[in-house]
Image: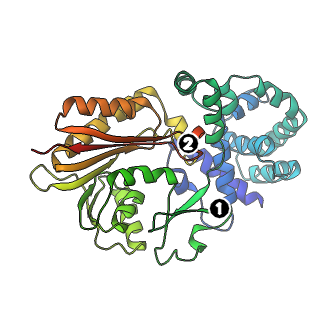
Amino acid sequence: MASSSRRAAAFALARWILTKEFIPSLLPDGPDRAFIQDLVYTSIRRLRPLRFVLGKLVNKWPKGELEALLYIGAAQVLYMDDVPDFAAVSETVEAAKSAKGSSASVVNGVLRNLIRRREEFLALLNQSPLEVRESFPTRLVRRWEERFGKENAAELCRIHNAPAETFLARPDGTYVQLERGCKVSSVPGYDQGSFIVQDPAARHAVELLDVHPGERILDACAAPGGKAVQIAWRGASLTACEVNPNRRRRLEENLSRLNLKDVKVISDIPQVGDARFDKVLVDAPCSNTGVFRRRPDARWNWSEEKMLSLVELQSSILEKVAPLVSPGGILVYSTCSNEVEENLSQVKSFLAKHKEFSLSSERESLPFQTNQDGAYAAAFIRNGD
């Protein structure tokens, strides 16, 4: 790949460091997009050990594009075995020549020194705590160790650091794993809406919803639309709600590509009395700890404070939709998190406040058990009035 790929990756990474924007929106379209994404995602996944190592190779911590270039270069040297050392250095240095100041000479010196001392640094990392070695927030790793044990926590970290497999979900309920390097848009049936991209762990929520043709169903947090599509494929009369305008636009684009014209898209949860539904799905906003391998940046957005704020949001959404479930109907709550506060504790809190509901079933996908995304789903039945 040419130096322009490293330049584009460094620009995207520098922008993300500054703004924490949605990474795919920062990546340029073109034939090099997959490689650029690999550079950026690897750097973000391994941000903590990269900073640990680079901190021993620079006298003053760089900022801006130079910081991003050093991350990109070091990520190739330490974590991208398919990139030869000479290419990692020469192409990253070439990319640095268009940056300000003496970036090229700094990148050249640091990367060559890193290659010379690579075994030393890898040995240091191997002796470092799990959170440094595998690149996660310390508090999150401690939580996983307390809940799952040290061995499972370490395996969970390793899984979340592996590039995610891509699965295609089809209307008949089957999932097909896509070969690495294959573009989704090139798969036969893409233009006809014959499949969606979705991890098999997402099926739990839809299966608990137990959709039948003609049922009135509300998907209360519908974007980007994977579960909404699954519901519509099963013949339900679906209302899909999404309050965020940008995410709603993405939902509408996905429904359009799949030719699902009968889905009603709304911008806010209906008021009590406006409608009753046979079934309601709340695929709630969450901390995303189950999908770190797909969202490597999400680990750096995690904190207990942010998670507890999301717990309050999840609870408020459940409060809004509970009266919309018809007597005898089903309410399914799901997340792509493996944190107790967002899952089991949220369910217990809801049941304590809503005696008209009873827990029917719950499922959890733990990546170190399923080798799929982390996910949770619980189904409640509303007792007859």
Tell me where residue 356 appears, x and y as whole percent.
16, 38
| Residue under numbered circle 2 | 292
Return the mark for residue 33: 1
Say which element carries label 1.
helix
The reply to whether residue 224 is visible in this rendering is no
Spot the residue most to the right: 116
At x 47%, y 29%, the residue is 303
The reply to whether residue 333 is visible in this rendering is yes
Query: What kind of residue is marked 2?
Result: Phe
Q: CA distance from mark 1 to mark 2?
A: 20 Å
- In the displayed structure, would residue 9 be above or below residue 315? below
Closer to the camera in the image, 206 or 322: 206
Q: Quadrant of residue 354?
A: top left
Left or right of residue 94, residue 273 in this image: left
At x 55%, y 27%, the residue is 148
Tell me where residue 230 appears, x and y as whole percent.
39, 62
